[in-house]
Amino acid sequence: MCEFECVIEKIKFRNEENGYTVAVVSSNEETLVITGKFLNISIGEGFKVVGDFKTTKFGEQFDVDHYEIIEPKSIKGIEKYLSSGLIKGVGPVTAKLIVDKFGLNTLEVIEFNPDKLTAIKGISKKKTEIISQSLNQIKEMQNSMVFLQGFNISSNLAIKIYEHYKSSTIELIKKNPYRLVEDINGVGFISADKIALKMGIARDSIFRVRAGVLYLLTEASEKGGHTYQFVEQIKTKLNKLLNLQNDHSSNIVEDAFEILQKENIIKIFWKEKKQIICLTKFYNIEKNVANKIIKICYNISQDNLNIEKEIELYEKKKNILLHSDQKKAVDLAINSGICVITGGPGTGKTTIVSCILEILKSLNKKTILLAPTGRAAKRLSETTNFSASTIHRALEINFKQDKNIFVYNEDNPLNCDAVIIDEVSMVDINLMYYFLKAFPEGAKLILVGDKDQLPSVGVGNVLEDIISSNTIPVISLTKIYRQENNSLIIQNAHLINNGENPILDNRSSDFFFESKSNNDEIFESVINLVISRINKYLKIDSKKIQVLSAMRSGICGVENLNEKLQEKINPASEYKNELYIGSTILRELDKIMQITNNYNLEWSRKIEGTNKIEFGKGVFNGDMGEIKRIDNQSGEVEIIFDDKKTVIYPRSELNQISLAYAITIHKSQGSEFDVVVIPVISGPSLILTRNLIYTGVTRAKKMVVLVGSINSLNRMIKNKQATRRLTLLKEFLHESKEKIRLLYGK
């Protein structure tokens, strides 16, 4: 890292949205180009910059890591600073007059004795106030930036913080730095805690303990999918996190609990003789979801339609015969307010959905067909010949972003008689909540999914909780109908799901096992399979071969695999722009995935078969695509997703995407890929479970290749231990059903 002082001579480029700037500066009579993010910048301003020199296609530039603002120290610098347009009411002529009058004391006069400016011809008292106020606002901003950077906060994050708090930045953070965790996206508890302790805030401060409680509850939901925790568990974790050791600490923790309950941010109550704690938002969401599900179950006319003829017509049309269990599932869906149809691959779920759609159409019922992801919706459309969309798209993102995230809600319900949702195991409690808010009264809801898949990436355990509650009709399909000759994917998936060893003789056309004894060998084999062996055998683009790993870190983890696969599949080239996001390189033509929901990102898409362009909002966790263009100067990245949406990401949003040559099995839920390669490694039993390997195998359409140790594979298959998610939906479903029973005797 180098550092030096400089003065801005010329601004070559500036992106006002994210602060990215390319400027010409002078330093010790030398002229050079600097690049970086600056909250505000103007000709004549002085900076102390810290960073590194880099050679780019535009020549040598100094890439600024962080900076400090310094006042101009020369007459020429002060005049340039004042005439830059940064200070309201001062142009080049006025700037020269002021500097000629007050010289090196100019800035001090404007800040502390602005009335003296009226001695200059053309400067009225009102104009004096404007000039002084403008300079003070700039100083305020500069002071805030210096204050924030004193805690090693990046320029980009400092910009976010200042834009949120404005003139109150220093005051509010000094009073309670932990508010950053709740107010600013991108500031975690650990960062805020470092700032607070550096400022001298006591370890047992109520602000610190309060923030610690919220951090632990939020982490439990984001990382574990839990909607509640046990109070004793939180207390133990809190003592460890905050290093609370004195006798007074337990009182402080109780005080924090009391304050958070009074603010209605948390709830604490007893469940099965244990005290539990949860964020109020999840308590309310799960309770509302439970109430709406039970309401749908009972708030519909029970027609008991005889649909034997309709099923016969469907069988003739498709030239198939439905099994008795399949017929029961169709009958259940048509004659229930709400039901669940669950089963593994090849058990006929898609056939049942197709039959239900045909019958509802014959009954003149308007039906909406939905799936959680774009890939799943596209597959559903192709297999049923019925238009399907994502749940997010059906609800429509609200561009105004007023009180509702979605256009369709309790005040504006969906217009339909029935809704079928496929791949429900992927639906988290938040999405189910927003969907049910928009669900119309009197309509039918049919939930379809595989109960043995991993739970949703997001919070909650919706499908499992609904099924295990026994509060609504459920039918489980076990008989396998779809199985091609010499195919083992479906058969082996069911063997794995039943805890039995799969057939690994490598004689099938679509299921292979390659034995390797250690992680280094597994890694090399996976890379070789993707870039050479499989793509030559199937004549398939390597980008269409999806590596699925159980872990993010380690030799066979997603991060390491992506780095190597990127190097082989999309190597660096003078014709492809690239940029660093942390330690990751993003390059034009890279395969990427969106890793969080973003309801605000705007997209455009050409309507197929026309010259029209449609516009929308929202990119969601699990969406996959390819980088089309990178603008090195602005840091903007243009991405085309698999559903043809084009999105332009500002640099500040790039932490929401990751390379996707390899992804975790969790992130693959709801997707299908032509070819799947899975490294089978040893590791923690809490992660390497039966439903993890089952989920991975069932993502493959044409071929699955497992690489690793047979012992590791067998351990996973025998390990039925699924990570238990702590949720309240099941209990709330029981409560809601009991209320209905007491009220109506149902």
Image: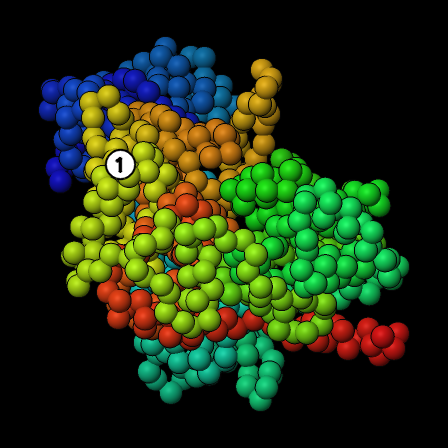
Q: Which residue is mark 1?
A: 536
Q: Is residue 733 at all visible to an observer of this figure?
A: yes
Q: Residue 529: where, in percent of width, then height?
A: 24, 45
Name which residue lies at 52% across and 23% down: 126
Q: Is residue 43 at all visible to an observer of this figure?
A: no
- Rendering quarter of residue 635: top left
Q: Quadrant of the C terminus?
A: bottom right
In the visual, does 54 lie left or right of 358? left
369 or 330, nearer to the observer: 330
Label 1 crowd bin: few (<14), some (14–19), many (20+), radius 10 Å: few
Q: Residue 690: where, in percent of width, then height?
A: 41, 68
508 or 362, nearer to the observer: 508
Vertical placement of 732 versus 589: above or below? below
Name which residue lies at 50% across and 53% down: 483
Q: Describe the element under mark 1 as helix, strand or loop.
A: helix
Vertical placement of 678 versus 365: above or below? below
Name which residue lies at 58% across and 27% down: 615
In the visual, does 37 lie left or right of 469? left
Name which residue lies at 29% across and 32% down: 587
Q: Residue 272: where, in percent of width, then height?
A: 59, 86
In the visual, does 270 lie left or right of 330? left
Q: Quadrant of the N terminus?
A: top left
Residue that sits furthest to the top in the current view: 93
Q: Residue 80: where, in percent of width, then height?
A: 29, 18
In the visual, does 11 lie left or right of 467? left
Name the amino acid type tagged 1: Lys
- The colour scheme used here is rainbow
Vertical placement of 240 versus 522: above or below? below
